[in-house]
Image (cartoon, rainbow, N blue to C red):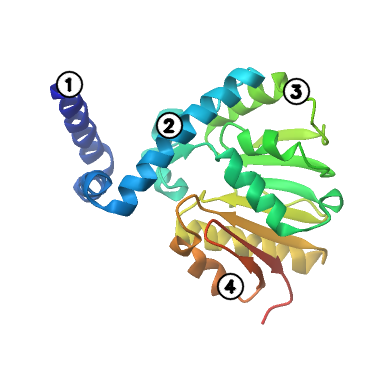
Amino acid sequence: MASRLQRSTLKLVNLARTQGLQTALLHATNAVAWHVVPSRRAFARSLEHERVLAQEFDQTYGVETAGESPLTAVGVPPEKAGRGNGLYRGIWSGVFHDALRETQLPLERFTFVDYGSGKGKALMLASAYPFRRIVGVEFAPGLHEVAVNNLGVFHSPGQRCLALEAVCADALEWEPPVEPLLCFFFNPFDDPTMERVVTRVARSWRQAPRDIYLLYVNIRDVSEQAHVFERHTALTPVKRGRHCMLMKVTAGR
Protein backbone atom coordinates (compact mmCIF):
# COMPACT_ATOMS: atom_id res chain seq x y z
CA MET A 1 0.00 0.00 0.00
CA ALA A 2 2.81 2.39 0.93
CA SER A 3 4.61 1.64 -2.33
CA ARG A 4 1.43 2.29 -4.36
CA LEU A 5 0.86 5.59 -2.52
CA GLN A 6 4.46 6.59 -3.18
CA ARG A 7 4.11 5.84 -6.91
CA SER A 8 0.87 7.81 -7.09
CA THR A 9 2.44 10.77 -5.32
CA LEU A 10 5.45 10.76 -7.64
CA LYS A 11 3.12 10.60 -10.65
CA LEU A 12 1.17 13.64 -9.44
CA VAL A 13 4.37 15.58 -8.78
CA ASN A 14 5.60 14.76 -12.28
CA LEU A 15 2.25 15.80 -13.81
CA ALA A 16 2.34 19.09 -11.92
CA ARG A 17 5.88 19.73 -13.16
CA THR A 18 5.28 18.82 -16.80
CA GLN A 19 1.61 19.73 -17.38
CA GLY A 20 0.75 22.13 -14.58
CA LEU A 21 -0.91 22.04 -11.17
CA GLN A 22 -4.45 22.15 -12.62
CA THR A 23 -3.84 18.97 -14.64
CA ALA A 24 -2.38 17.22 -11.60
CA LEU A 25 -5.35 18.19 -9.43
CA LEU A 26 -7.80 16.98 -12.08
CA HIS A 27 -5.95 13.67 -12.25
CA ALA A 28 -6.07 13.34 -8.45
CA THR A 29 -9.82 14.06 -8.40
CA ASN A 30 -10.46 11.44 -11.07
CA ALA A 31 -8.35 8.90 -9.18
CA VAL A 32 -10.46 9.38 -6.04
CA ALA A 33 -13.67 9.05 -8.10
CA TRP A 34 -12.62 5.56 -9.23
CA HIS A 35 -12.89 4.42 -5.61
CA VAL A 36 -16.05 6.21 -4.42
CA VAL A 37 -18.41 6.68 -7.41
CA PRO A 38 -20.43 3.45 -8.08
CA SER A 39 -20.42 3.83 -11.88
CA ARG A 40 -16.66 4.39 -11.86
CA ARG A 41 -16.13 1.38 -9.62
CA ALA A 42 -18.17 -0.80 -12.00
CA PHE A 43 -16.15 0.50 -14.94
CA ALA A 44 -12.94 -0.30 -13.06
CA ARG A 45 -14.09 -3.91 -12.72
CA SER A 46 -14.76 -4.03 -16.46
CA LEU A 47 -11.29 -2.67 -17.09
CA GLU A 48 -9.75 -5.51 -15.11
CA HIS A 49 -11.74 -8.11 -17.06
CA GLU A 50 -10.78 -6.53 -20.38
CA ARG A 51 -7.10 -6.46 -19.40
CA VAL A 52 -7.21 -10.25 -19.18
CA LEU A 53 -8.93 -10.52 -22.58
CA ALA A 54 -6.39 -8.12 -24.11
CA GLN A 55 -3.50 -10.22 -22.84
CA GLU A 56 -5.12 -13.33 -24.31
CA PHE A 57 -5.49 -11.54 -27.67
CA ASP A 58 -1.79 -10.63 -27.64
CA GLN A 59 -0.72 -14.16 -26.74
CA THR A 60 -2.92 -15.69 -29.45
CA TYR A 61 -1.55 -13.52 -32.26
CA GLY A 62 1.95 -12.76 -30.99
CA VAL A 63 1.33 -9.01 -30.86
CA GLU A 64 1.55 -6.21 -28.28
CA THR A 65 -1.60 -4.16 -27.69
CA ALA A 66 -2.50 -4.64 -24.01
CA GLY A 67 -1.90 -2.15 -21.24
CA GLU A 68 -2.03 1.63 -21.08
CA SER A 69 0.62 4.18 -22.00
CA PRO A 70 0.77 7.93 -21.31
CA LEU A 71 1.23 9.65 -24.66
CA THR A 72 4.18 11.58 -23.26
CA ALA A 73 5.96 8.21 -22.87
CA VAL A 74 5.56 7.30 -26.57
CA GLY A 75 6.96 10.39 -28.23
CA VAL A 76 4.20 12.99 -27.88
CA PRO A 77 5.28 16.38 -26.50
CA PRO A 78 3.48 17.31 -23.23
CA GLU A 79 1.81 20.33 -24.86
CA LYS A 80 0.19 18.05 -27.46
CA ALA A 81 -0.70 15.05 -25.28
CA GLY A 82 -4.03 16.57 -24.25
CA ARG A 83 -5.18 16.55 -27.87
CA GLY A 84 -5.10 12.75 -27.69
CA ASN A 85 -6.73 12.60 -24.24
CA GLY A 86 -3.31 11.90 -22.73
CA LEU A 87 -3.45 8.10 -22.75
CA TYR A 88 -3.25 5.06 -25.04
CA ARG A 89 -5.68 2.20 -24.39
CA GLY A 90 -6.53 -0.50 -26.93
CA ILE A 91 -10.13 -0.99 -28.05
CA TRP A 92 -12.09 -3.76 -26.35
CA SER A 93 -12.72 -6.53 -28.87
CA GLY A 94 -16.36 -7.11 -27.89
CA VAL A 95 -17.25 -3.42 -28.11
CA PHE A 96 -15.52 -3.15 -31.49
CA HIS A 97 -17.36 -6.10 -33.03
CA ASP A 98 -20.70 -4.92 -31.62
CA ALA A 99 -20.13 -1.48 -33.15
CA LEU A 100 -19.23 -2.90 -36.59
CA ARG A 101 -22.30 -5.16 -36.60
CA GLU A 102 -24.53 -2.24 -35.62
CA THR A 103 -23.55 -0.24 -38.71
CA GLN A 104 -25.25 -2.78 -41.02
CA LEU A 105 -23.23 -1.25 -43.86
CA PRO A 106 -21.99 -3.18 -46.93
CA LEU A 107 -18.45 -3.11 -45.57
CA GLU A 108 -16.92 -4.55 -48.73
CA ARG A 109 -17.54 -1.15 -50.36
CA PHE A 110 -15.51 0.79 -47.79
CA THR A 111 -11.99 1.57 -46.73
CA PHE A 112 -11.71 1.45 -42.94
CA VAL A 113 -9.77 4.37 -41.44
CA ASP A 114 -8.90 4.31 -37.74
CA TYR A 115 -8.11 7.79 -36.44
CA GLY A 116 -5.77 7.47 -33.47
CA SER A 117 -4.95 3.85 -34.27
CA GLY A 118 -2.44 3.38 -31.43
CA LYS A 119 -0.80 -0.04 -31.56
CA GLY A 120 -3.10 -1.22 -34.33
CA LYS A 121 -5.58 -3.39 -32.46
CA ALA A 122 -8.63 -2.00 -34.26
CA LEU A 123 -6.86 -2.57 -37.58
CA MET A 124 -6.33 -6.22 -36.75
CA LEU A 125 -9.90 -6.64 -35.52
CA ALA A 126 -11.23 -4.90 -38.65
CA SER A 127 -9.40 -7.41 -40.84
CA ALA A 128 -12.08 -9.97 -39.91
CA TYR A 129 -14.45 -7.96 -42.16
CA PRO A 130 -14.36 -7.63 -45.97
CA PHE A 131 -13.14 -4.02 -46.19
CA ARG A 132 -11.44 -2.89 -49.40
CA ARG A 133 -8.44 -1.93 -47.29
CA ILE A 134 -7.63 -0.82 -43.74
CA VAL A 135 -5.62 2.26 -42.72
CA GLY A 136 -4.58 3.45 -39.27
CA VAL A 137 -3.48 7.02 -38.57
CA GLU A 138 -1.41 7.62 -35.42
CA PHE A 139 0.64 10.66 -34.40
CA ALA A 140 2.57 9.08 -31.48
CA PRO A 141 5.81 7.67 -32.95
CA GLY A 142 6.19 5.06 -30.22
CA LEU A 143 2.68 3.68 -30.76
CA HIS A 144 3.09 3.72 -34.54
CA GLU A 145 6.30 1.72 -34.31
CA VAL A 146 4.56 -0.98 -32.26
CA ALA A 147 1.65 -1.01 -34.73
CA VAL A 148 3.99 -1.60 -37.67
CA ASN A 149 5.61 -4.51 -35.82
CA ASN A 150 2.19 -5.93 -34.91
CA LEU A 151 0.90 -5.80 -38.47
CA GLY A 152 4.08 -7.48 -39.63
CA VAL A 153 3.40 -10.61 -37.58
CA PHE A 154 -0.40 -10.66 -37.32
CA HIS A 155 -2.26 -13.44 -39.05
CA SER A 156 -5.72 -14.82 -38.35
CA PRO A 157 -7.46 -17.73 -40.07
CA GLY A 158 -10.63 -15.62 -40.11
CA GLN A 159 -8.98 -12.68 -41.84
CA ARG A 160 -11.02 -11.29 -44.74
CA CYS A 161 -8.97 -8.18 -45.51
CA LEU A 162 -5.22 -8.49 -46.04
CA ALA A 163 -4.48 -4.87 -47.01
CA LEU A 164 -3.52 -3.31 -43.67
CA GLU A 165 -1.46 -0.13 -43.39
CA ALA A 166 -0.24 1.96 -40.45
CA VAL A 167 0.53 5.64 -41.12
CA CYS A 168 2.41 7.94 -38.74
CA ALA A 169 0.71 11.30 -39.24
CA ASP A 170 -1.18 14.07 -37.50
CA ALA A 171 -4.93 13.69 -38.13
CA LEU A 172 -5.15 17.47 -38.49
CA GLU A 173 -2.86 17.30 -41.52
CA TRP A 174 -3.56 13.86 -43.02
CA GLU A 175 -5.78 13.83 -46.11
CA PRO A 176 -8.51 11.14 -46.18
CA PRO A 177 -8.29 8.91 -49.28
CA VAL A 178 -10.70 9.70 -52.08
CA GLU A 179 -12.83 6.56 -51.80
CA PRO A 180 -15.83 5.42 -49.73
CA LEU A 181 -14.77 5.55 -46.09
CA LEU A 182 -15.79 4.24 -42.71
CA CYS A 183 -13.90 6.52 -40.34
CA PHE A 184 -13.48 4.95 -36.91
CA PHE A 185 -12.91 6.98 -33.75
CA PHE A 186 -12.23 5.18 -30.47
CA ASN A 187 -12.46 8.30 -28.31
CA PRO A 188 -9.10 9.48 -29.69
CA PHE A 189 -9.23 13.28 -29.36
CA ASP A 190 -10.29 16.13 -27.14
CA ASP A 191 -13.28 18.19 -28.32
CA PRO A 192 -11.41 20.90 -30.31
CA THR A 193 -9.26 18.34 -32.12
CA MET A 194 -12.23 16.11 -32.90
CA GLU A 195 -14.16 19.05 -34.32
CA ARG A 196 -11.24 20.01 -36.57
CA VAL A 197 -10.76 16.43 -37.77
CA VAL A 198 -14.47 16.09 -38.60
CA THR A 199 -14.32 19.40 -40.46
CA ARG A 200 -11.36 18.10 -42.46
CA VAL A 201 -13.26 14.92 -43.37
CA ALA A 202 -16.30 16.98 -44.38
CA ARG A 203 -14.10 19.17 -46.58
CA SER A 204 -12.76 16.04 -48.27
CA TRP A 205 -16.35 15.00 -49.00
CA ARG A 206 -17.16 18.41 -50.53
CA GLN A 207 -14.12 18.15 -52.78
CA ALA A 208 -15.00 14.58 -53.84
CA PRO A 209 -18.52 13.51 -52.84
CA ARG A 210 -18.75 9.81 -51.92
CA ASP A 211 -20.10 7.71 -49.07
CA ILE A 212 -18.31 8.64 -45.84
CA TYR A 213 -19.53 7.38 -42.47
CA LEU A 214 -18.13 8.23 -39.04
CA LEU A 215 -18.30 5.59 -36.31
CA TYR A 216 -17.56 6.94 -32.82
CA VAL A 217 -17.00 4.46 -30.00
CA ASN A 218 -16.65 5.16 -26.27
CA ILE A 219 -16.38 2.28 -23.78
CA ARG A 220 -18.02 4.42 -21.10
CA ASP A 221 -20.76 6.34 -22.93
CA VAL A 222 -20.87 8.22 -26.25
CA SER A 223 -22.64 11.09 -24.47
CA GLU A 224 -19.20 12.24 -23.32
CA GLN A 225 -18.48 13.63 -26.79
CA ALA A 226 -21.71 13.28 -28.76
CA HIS A 227 -22.22 17.05 -28.71
CA VAL A 228 -19.21 17.56 -31.00
CA PHE A 229 -20.82 15.45 -33.72
CA GLU A 230 -24.40 16.59 -33.13
CA ARG A 231 -23.57 20.26 -33.64
CA HIS A 232 -21.61 19.67 -36.85
CA THR A 233 -23.81 20.67 -39.77
CA ALA A 234 -22.13 18.27 -42.23
CA LEU A 235 -23.12 15.16 -40.25
CA THR A 236 -26.45 13.34 -40.39
CA PRO A 237 -27.11 10.93 -37.48
CA VAL A 238 -27.78 7.33 -38.51
CA LYS A 239 -27.70 5.29 -35.28
CA ARG A 240 -26.83 5.81 -31.66
CA GLY A 241 -26.42 3.45 -28.71
CA ARG A 242 -24.62 3.72 -25.41
CA HIS A 243 -21.18 2.76 -26.72
CA CYS A 244 -21.30 3.77 -30.38
CA MET A 245 -22.86 6.27 -32.74
CA LEU A 246 -22.88 6.24 -36.53
CA MET A 247 -23.10 9.39 -38.67
CA LYS A 248 -22.99 10.07 -42.40
CA VAL A 249 -21.24 13.03 -44.02
CA THR A 250 -23.80 14.91 -46.13
CA ALA A 251 -24.34 18.33 -47.66
CA GLY A 252 -25.44 19.61 -44.28
CA ARG A 253 -28.63 20.26 -42.42
| Mark 4 lies on residue | 232
**Amino acid of disc 3:** His
What is the number of the mark on residue 29? none
Looking at the picture, tell me which residue is in the foreground, 22 or 182.
182
Whether residue 199 can be seen here: yes
Dot 4 falls on a residue whose secondary structure is loop
Where is residue 130 shown, x and y percent of the image? 83, 43
The residue singled out by tag 1 in the image is 3
Q: Residue at x 72, y 52 (%)?
A: 176
Residue name at image x 20 percent, y 48 percent: 25
Q: Position of residue 62 (x, y in %)?
A: 63, 17
Name the amino acid type tagged 1. Ser
Looking at the picture, how far across and down is residue 166, in whole percent? 68, 34
The residue at which mark 3 appears reads as: 155
How many residues crowd mark 2 within 10 Å: few (<14), some (14–19), many (20+)?
some
For marks 2 and 1, give the one nearer the viewer.
1
* Element type at mark 3: loop
Lower sequence index among marks 4 and 2? 2
Could you tell me how far apart the alpha carbons at marks 4 and 2 are, in whole angstroms?
31 Å
Q: Tell me the crowding category of disc 1: few under 14, some 14 to 19, or many 20 or more residues within 10 angstroms, Cα based.
A: few
Circle 2/circle 1 CB separation < 8 Å = no
Rendered position, 47 above or below 33 = above
Alpha carbon separation for disc pair 3 and 2: 25 Å
Instruction: Describe residue 199's horizontal placement relative to residue 41 as left or right.
Output: right
- The disc, 1 or 4, on the residue closer to the chain's N-terminal end is 1
Disc number lying in front (1 or 4): 1
Q: Residues within 10 Å of mark 3 (few under 14, many from 20)?
A: some
